[in-house]
Image (cartoon, rainbow, N blue to C red):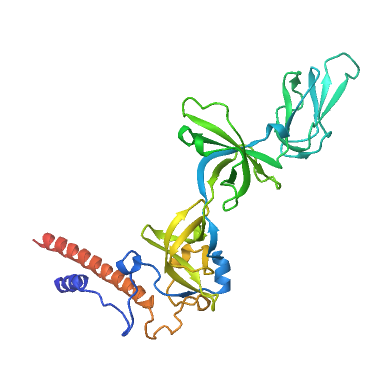
Amino acid sequence: MRSAVLIALIAAASPLPAFAHEGEDHVAAPGSESAQGGVTGPIEVSEAAQRNLGLTVAAAELRPIETTLRVIGEIAADPERSGAVSSRISGRVSALLTQEGERVKKGQPLVEVESRQLGDPPPRVRYASPISGVVTDRHVVVGDNVDPSQHLFEVADLSEVLAIGRVFEGQIGQVAVGQKVRVEVPSYPGMVFEGVVDRLGGTLEPESRTLSVFARVRNAESRLRPHMRASLSLITSGGAPALAIPKSAVLGESGQLFAFVQSQDRPDRFERRPVVLGLSDDRYAEVIDGLAPGDRVVAEGNYSLQYMTPGADERNGGADSEGATGKGAHASPLPRVLWALGAAGVAGAALIGVRAWRAHARTMSRVR
């Protein structure tokens, strides 16, 4: 019994074989020194894989880098394009002819009110929409008592809306009526809505010391709805043309920035290239070094590329183009599997040895 225990303990203490094939390089584990640099050579991504990753490319080109002021705000209906429906008589709602969110035309009946005046039946009056637009609010249900002081429905023409932001007191001098504005909302990531500053608020909010900025934004497809959160980029000044790429094309950390450049001869080949950036606005970054005009960079879907194997062809499932055992090929995942199995076997042997030793000790104690 002692011999079995000794063998198990020796097996647990013995170093495991590497299981590496001769002539193969080992793949560095994620987070190791060699892995931190990411891809160091060109990678190949088939057209199908590019579609699956959502890869889009954009050309490095000369464009003005604008100075922008970014503020947080929300979307609101334009009061000049809104209307309310109320009853001119006191009575009871007898019928609802539309619902919140529906599109209506000017003059279309929305609600029917039964008068409190005596009659058999009592007089009924229908009230129509004052404008064409979308029913944004409904404040009554059938059977509600109503009077001329309350709103029954609210309708808004959302083909143009207001994006309302707030700027701090020290930023007011950078904002002026007529400035261009780019608006983004979380509901439509990557989509930009264009507008202009329509007016500024009349007074500062006492607690936050901020001033409201009202930007009129085109909304032909009615994607923007009242009370949506929004981010406003106020264009405070233009700049001289500079070689620029989309900010989304830049990866890495400060001092180690890079972009993936598509080969001109091989659309399925991408090279990681270090870049040095200059000025930037809310959309584009100036490239001081690393790219030339016309270079095509990956603007979307580039995050996954930094973890692909250099020289791997996605059309062959990621296998190296020189073969699994060719020169410079990366280590097969098989050794890792064998290593894991070996580790599991050693752990099992050690556990068996411990249990055997405990059983032997109990036996000896009973003998004594």
Name above or below for residue 51 compared with residue 161. below
> In the displayed image of the protein, which residue is found farthest to the right?
120
Where in the figure is residue 260, as x and y percent of width and height? 47, 68
Total marks shown come to: 0
Name above or below for residue 52 compared with residue 191. below
Q: Which quadrant of the figure contains the N terminus?
A: bottom left
**Residue 102 in the figure: left or right of residue 346:** right
Name above or below for residue 185 compared with residue 56. above
**Nearest the camera: 118 or 253?**
253
**Residue 10 in the figure: left or right of residue 199:** left
At a point 33% along the width and 79% down the height, the residue shown is 25
> In the displayed image of the protein, which residue is found farthest to the left?
368
**Nearest the camera: 250 or 38?**
250
**Nearest the camera: 246 or 368?**
246
At a point 13% along the width and 60% down the height, the residue shown is 366
Choose top left, top right, bottom left or bottom right for residue 78.
top right
Where in the figure is residue 38, as x and y percent of width and height? 38, 67
> In the displayed image of the protein, which residue is found farthest to the front?
240
Q: Which quadrant of the figure contains the C terminus?
A: bottom left
